[in-house]
Image (cartoon, rainbow, N blue to C red):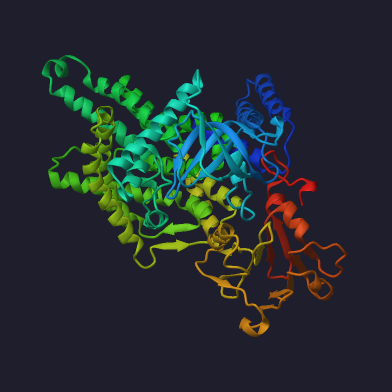
Amino acid sequence: MQAALAALAGEQDRWILWAPVILGIGIGLYFAVPVEPPLWLGTACILAAIVAGWLKRARGKILLLATAFGLLALGFSVAQWRTVLVTAPALERQIGPTGVTGRVVGMETLPKGSRIRLDKVHIAGLDPHRTPKRVRIILKGPQPALQPGDRITLRAQLVPPPPPAAPGAFDFQRRAFFDGLGGVGWALGPAEITDRRATQGLDSILLGLAELRHNVTRRIHAALPGERGTVAAALMTGERRTVAPDLMEAIRDSGLAHLLAISGLHIGLVAGVLFVGVRAALALVPPLALRYPIKKWAAAAAIPGAFAYALLAGATIPTLRAFLMIGLVLLAVLVDRRGISMRLVAWAALVILLIRPESILGASFQMSFAAVIALVAVFEALRGHFGGRGKRGPLRIIALYLAGVAVTTLIAGTATAPFAIYHFNRFAAFGLAANMAAVPVTALWVMPWIVIAFLLMPLGLESWALVPMSWGIDVVLYVARTVASWPGAVTVLPAMSTSLLALVSLSGLWLCLWRMPWRRLGAVGIVAGFAVFPWTAPPDLLVDGKARVVAARTPDGHLAVSSLRSARFERDVWLRRAGTARMEPWPENTEEAGTGGWLSCDSLGCIYKARGRTVAVVRKPGALLEDCPRVDALISLVPIRQPCPGPGVVVDRFDLWQEGTHALWIGTNGRIRVESVNNSRGRRPWVLRPRASGF
C-alpha cells in the first residue's frame, strides 16, 4: 500500500488527466443501472463530496478521495440532468397511413431517395401531448425541391424507434431518445410544401447551416456524379449515406473507414492547409514577414476555418473533439506555448462529456479518443529521441513522412481495435498497407483541393478544384477495393461483452496516462482482457421480438435460420455478432435435415439439441401438448394460454412482444440462461415497452 501511495504521489502532475476518466465512469454507472435513479441522488453525492473536502481540507488523502468521488458524482448527475432535459414523447405503436405536418430540419441523400427530419410535428389522430418532438421519414419517388426550414405535409406510416436487434447490440432507441427523435417511418407519395423557410431567431441560424450543408452536398454531386461525388460529399460535408453499400464495405474491410468519418485527421489537415497557406502567402511579402508575427496571424486565420469546417460537417463528436484540440494547439501558437499534450486531450474530453454525456457510449467518442490518447502517449514517450536536426534531403523527408504514417496507423489501429471489435465485430488485417498508400494521397492531394473548393464555391467555380480532387479519390478507392479483395483482408469476430471492453479500456488508460513503471500493469490488463475474449460464447438460439425468425447455432459455429426472407436487418446483426460469415436455412422436416440430430423440424415446430439439453421451438399450438413435458426449454412463436409444465425456461409470443428479441445460452454444465433486449436494458426512459392493449 505504501509503495502504491508513493507512486501515486510521484505522478501528481498527471492526476488532472484522470478527471475526465472518473467523470466518464460516473456517466457509465448512470447508464448501467437497471432502473432510473432518483434525480436528487447525483446532486446529493456532489454536495457530500464538497462537504467532506471542506471539513477535511487539511488532509491531502481525504481531499483527493473527496475530489474523485465528487467527479464520479458529477458524471452521474450530468447524465441524469441530460436525460431530464431531452425527455420527449415517443410513439408507442405503429401509426398510419396518416397525415403528418412538420418543419424540415435535416436532410440526407440516400442511394434511392432521401431521408428528412421534421420538428414541430403534427400527426393526424394523435394527441399533441403524445406527439413526438421530431420524426424521421424516408422519401422515395418524385419529390419537390425541399430545403431545411420548409414546412411540409405528407402521408406517412410511422413506427416507434426500433429496439436493439439482440441483447447487447446497438441501441437505436437510446440514441433516438437523446436526439429527440420519437418516431421513424416512410412517406406514401410526394410531400407538399406549405411554407418556405418559416424560421426566426436561433432556428434561422441552425437551419441556415443545415441548408448550406445540403446545398454544398448538392453542388458536389452536380460537379462529380457517381461514386466520386458520394465520397467527396462524405469528405466535405460528412454526408456518407449516398456511398454505395458495396463500396462502403470495401472501404471498411480495407481499414480506410476513418477517411470518410470526418474527425481529427480532416480537421487537422484543413487547419494545417490554412495555416501553411496563409503563412506562406504572407511570407511572400517581405515587409510583413520581417516586421510582424505572421505565424500567429496564420494561426488566427486557421481557427475560424477549422471551426467552419466542423460546423459544415455536422459538428459530430469526433469533429468537436478535433476542433477543441486543434483550436487549443493554434491558441498555444498565439501565446507562444507548446500545444500538443495529454492535458489538451483531457480538456476536450471534459467539455464533450459535460455537454453530451451520452456520447461516451458511442463508437465515435470511444475510437476517436482512444486513437488520440495512444498517439499522444507515444509522442510523449518518444519526445527527445528524434530531436536531431541533421541534413534532410528529399528522400529522407519522404521516408520520415511514410514512417510517420506507418507508425501513426499502427498505433491508432491498435488502440481502436477493441472498440472496432465491440461495435462492428470486424478487424481489418491489412489496414496498415491500405493506409500507407491512401493517407498520403488524402493528406497531400485531396484535402488541399477540398480547401480550395470551399474557397471557390462562392464564385461558382468549385468544379475547378473538385475535378482534380477526384483524381486522388480514384486512387483511394482503388486502394480500398484492392486491399479488401485480398484473402483474409477482414476477420469477423464474435461480440465482446461490455465488461470486457471496460477492462481493456481502463487498462489502456492506465498504460497511457501514467509515466512511472507501474503503468505497465495496464498492459497486463489488456492482455488478460484479450485472453478471456475467445471464451465469450455467442447465444445458441435467438428469436426476434416479432416472432418472424429464429436462429440456432450449428455444431460448427455457424447460424441456421428459420427464414431467409424475413427480418433481414435482425439476421444481419445476429450473423455479425456471432462472428461468422455463413448463414444456413433450417430444414423443413427431419428427413431433409441432415443435421446429425442437433436440429429436427416438422410442420408444428423444431427440436434443438446441444450439450445434453433439448429446446423446443413451437410454430403452432398443436406442438405444445407434446413438447411441454419432454424438453428443458420451450420457445413458442404463438401465445401460450394454458400452463406448460416441464420446461425450466418458457418464452412465448407474449414475452417476445413485451421484452423484444430473446437470446438463449446452453452452458457446458447444461445450465440454460435467457436474456432479452428489454430486460438487459432495464426500465429506463429510452426503453419503449408496448402498452398492454397493443397486442
Q: Position of residue 191 (x, y in %)?
A: 52, 38
Left or right placement of residue 589 versus residue 13 in this view = right
Q: Quadrant of residue 323?
A: top left
Residue at 68%, 47% in the rendered image:
681
Left or right placement of residue 30 versus residue 604 in this view = left
Left or right placement of residue 638 versus residue 526 in this view = right
Residue at 57%, 36% in the rendered image:
179
Q: Nearest the camera: 526 or 395? A: 395
Q: Is residue 90 above or below residue 332?
A: below
Q: Nearest the camera: 541 or 200? A: 200
Left or right placement of residue 424 versus residue 541 in this view = left
Q: Quadrant of the N terminus?
A: top right
Q: Position of residue 67 (x, y in %)?
A: 61, 27
Q: How many marks?
A: 0
Q: Position of residue 10 (x, y in %)?
A: 49, 34
Residue at 24%, 38% in the rendered image:
463
Residue at 88%, 64% in the rendered image:
642
Q: Nearest the camera: 17 or 653? A: 653
Residue 526 seen from this side: no
Q: Quadrant of residue 515?
A: top left
Residue 549 seen from this side: yes
Q: Position of residue 318 (x, y in %)?
A: 44, 38
Q: Nearest the camera: 585 or 111? A: 111
